[in-house]
Image (tube, grey):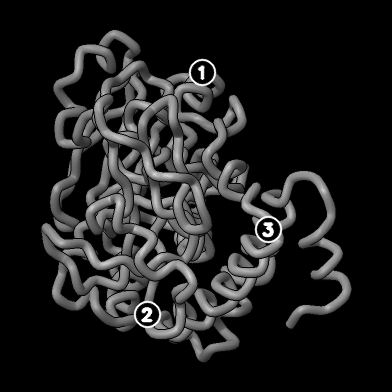
Amino acid sequence: MLDRTLLDELTQPGFRLPALTNWLTTEVWTMDRYREVGEKPADYLVAGEGLVHHRETLLTLAGESLYDELASAPPANRSVRAFLDRCPGASVVVFDGCSIRELPRLVRLAESSHRPVLDRSYGFAAVPSETEFFISQRLGLGLPTISPSALPGRRELREQGIKAYWQRQPTQQFRIEEGSESSLLWVRFPDMRFMDTAAANAELFDSIWDMLEMVWMRTVQMLPASRPVLVTSDHGYIFLGAGLSDPRLNGVDRPLEGKRYREFADEEPLPLKKAGLWVDPARRLAVVAGRVHNRPQAPSPSNSVYRHGGLSVMEMLTPWLVLGPKE
C-alpha cells in the first residue's frame, strides 16, 4: 500500500537503493514470510515478486535514478578479490543465477553446516546481468569476458594463488584439499534450470529451493572446514509470471531485437534513453530496465518467465554471505 511513509521515501532526494535493499532483506525475502505462505517455495516466489513489482514500479514512476544506482560500481569491499585479500586461503562459491530471494535458504543451510554467518549482505551483478560480464567486471581478478567453464585453466588465477573449479552438474563433487591456495568454485546451478521447459511456471522454484540443499552438500560442505567461505552469485533473475511485468514497457525492447540487452556497432545509431531502456553511450550498450517481459526471438527459452540479462532489482542484487570456519 502507498502510505505517507512510503510516499516520503519515494519522493525524497538522494539514494534510493539503501532503503530498498533493507526492505527486500528484512521484509520481503525472509524466512518469516516463507513461513507465512505455508512454507511453499512457489507461493513465496510469486507473493514476493508481487511486492517487488509494486515497489519497483512506484520507484521508476518517481524517477529513474534507481537504475543508475544499480548500474554503478559496487563498494570496493564487495568483490571476490577484496574478500580474498582480507581472508588469504579462503574459499569462494558462486551459485550461478542465485538471487537475494534465496538468501534466507542459504543462511539456513549455513547454520545446519555449523558455519557462523559473519556477513549477510548483497552483491551486484554486472551490466548487462550476464555471467561473462560479471567475470570481467565484478570478480576483480583481472579476467576477460569469458565463460565460467574456462576458469580452471586461466593463468591469471594460478598467478594469484587461486585454484578454480567448475561444477557442470549438481551431482558433481570435488575433493578440495586444505592448502595455501584459495578455492574458487563456480556452480552452474540454479541458472541451468532456467533453460528447462518447466521454466514457464512458478513451480520450478519448488525444485530450485529443495535442490539447493543437495548442491550445498556437494560444494560448501566439501570445502576446508578451517577456512572462511564467501557464498555469492553472478546475477539474480526476475520472475515474470502473469501480472508481474509493467505493461507500460511493452515493446521497449524493439531496438534490442527482442533481447534483454544489445551492444551497438560504431556505425549504428544508439536508441534514445527512455522508460524501460537504459543506455550507456560510452559502451554503446542498451539494456532493458525494470519489469520488462520481453519475448526473445532466439534462442530458447522464449517461454521462460525466469529472466536475466537486463537491469532490474531482482536481476542486479545477489547474495553476499561470508561464513566463518566450522564450529
Q: Is 225 or 194 nearer to us in this picture?
A: 194
- The answer to which image quadrant residue 270 occupies is top left
- State whether residue 30 appears in this view: no
Q: Which residue is mark 1?
A: 85
CA–CA distance in space, label 3 to label 1: 29 Å
The residue that mark 3 highlights is: 20
CB contact under 8 Å: marks 3 and 2: no
Q: Within 10 angstroms of label 2, few (less than 14), some, or many (20 or more) residues?
A: some
Which one is nearer the viewer's eye here, 56 or 288?
288
Q: Residue at x 46, y 39 (%)?
A: 230
Circles 3 and 1, Cβ within 8 Å, touching? The answer is no
- Residue with the most extreme top position: 159
Q: Earlier in the sequence, mark 3 or mark 1?
A: 3
Q: Residue at image x 42%, y 38%?
A: 126
Q: Nearer the viewer, residue 115 or 129?
A: 129
Tag 2: amino acid: Gly
Q: Earlier in the sequence, mark 3 or mark 2?
A: 3
- Position of residue 9 relative to residue 199, above or below, is above
Is the residue 47 above or below the residue 181 in the image?
A: below
x, y percentage for residue 205? Answer: 34, 75
Residue located beneath label 2 in the image? 241
Q: Amino acid at mark 3?
A: Leu
Q: Give the x, y percent position of residue 161.
A: 32, 14
The secondary element bearing badge 2 is classed as loop
| Residue at disc 1, secondary structure | helix
Amino acid of disc 1 = Asp
Percent x, y of residue 77: 59, 27
- State which mark lies toward you, 3 or 1: 3
Asked if the residues shown at circle 2 and circle 1 are in contact, with their CB atoms under 8 angstroms apart, the answer is no
Inter-mark Cα distance, 3 to 2: 22 Å
